[in-house]
Image: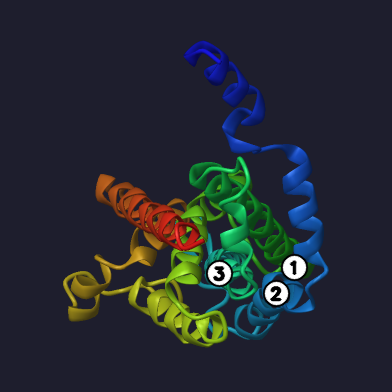
Amino acid sequence: MTTTDLATLHARRVPPLGALNLTLLRLELRRLLRNRRTVIFTLVVPVMFFLLFGLNLPQGTDRFPHGNATAYVMISMGVYGAMLGTTSTGASVSIERSLGWSRQLRLTPLNPIAYIAVKLLLALAIGLMSVTAVYAAGAFTHKASMDTALWFETAAIAWVGSLTFAAFGLFMGYLLPGENVMQILGPGLALLAILGGLFFPLDDGSVMQQIGQFTPMFGLSALVHAPLTGKSFDPLWVVNVVGWLVVFAAGAVWRFRKDTARV
């Protein structure tokens, strides 16, 4: 058999993008939605937090340039819910690792990049559900008020920005033991949200602000709240989001290759 024949045979055996297809995404999404814990963390918890803190906020009617304080809380809870949903979805690979699934993938045409892409797309779908649920609660209660266009703009920023935490979840899922990953990530995400100014604005020049600007949540929190607060855009916010996305995605690919190499 010639080299050309071998190349042709290999091309036939390995599907485009390493078996990345809609069927795989659909099966993974269906399996994920059957997990009650995922549904609770994605849909119930962020909505409950908004109802508890957003509707009972004493300053809820206080105005920002383009909306009220309740809308600020709604945006924050939308981001937090998306962060929880995408991170937990990515971190679910820890369970697959404990079952030996990662080693089995080494025997398939699925390459690391395609597998990571499937997980990230799946996490984005979960993140979209979370953002939609929180914003629907805000609209239904009629307490959150902001310019009409900002409902769509902030929701889109929250959703797309949550991709960073999908990559974070994947990285942690490969880095940490399966039985401990969620116990570690839960408090860690809350801490990142606080340091990043998600729950309350950080004072300019404060020690927390100086520390928080280097955390993964800072850029996303600033980007998603700026349309409401009227704060001037800073390109470093985008650098923060993209930079951490690259770091976490590269870490996930590295750990996946290391994991599947041990067959």
Q: Earlier in the sequence, mark 1 or mark 2?
A: 2
Q: Would residue 150 be visible to someone looking at this image?
A: no
Q: Are marks 1 and 2 in contact (CB under 8 Å)?
A: yes
Nearest the camera: 83 or 135? 83
The residue where tag 3 is placed is 91
Q: Residues within 10 Å of mark 2 (few under 14, many from 20)?
A: many
Q: Residue at x 79, y 62 (%)?
A: 31
Q: Earlier in the sequence, mark 1 or mark 3?
A: 3
Q: Residue 214: x and y, percent? A: 24, 65
Nearest the camera: 260 or 164? 260
Q: Earlier in the sequence, mark 2 or mark 3?
A: 2
Q: Residue at x 42, y 53 (%)?
A: 253
Instruction: Report the mark closest to the observer, 2 or 3.
Output: 3
- SS under mark 1: helix
Q: Residue at x 70, y 37 (%)?
A: 21
The residue where tag 2 is placed is 47
The residue where tag 1 is placed is 137
Instruction: Report the mark closest to the observer, 1 or 3.
Output: 3
- SS under mark 2: helix
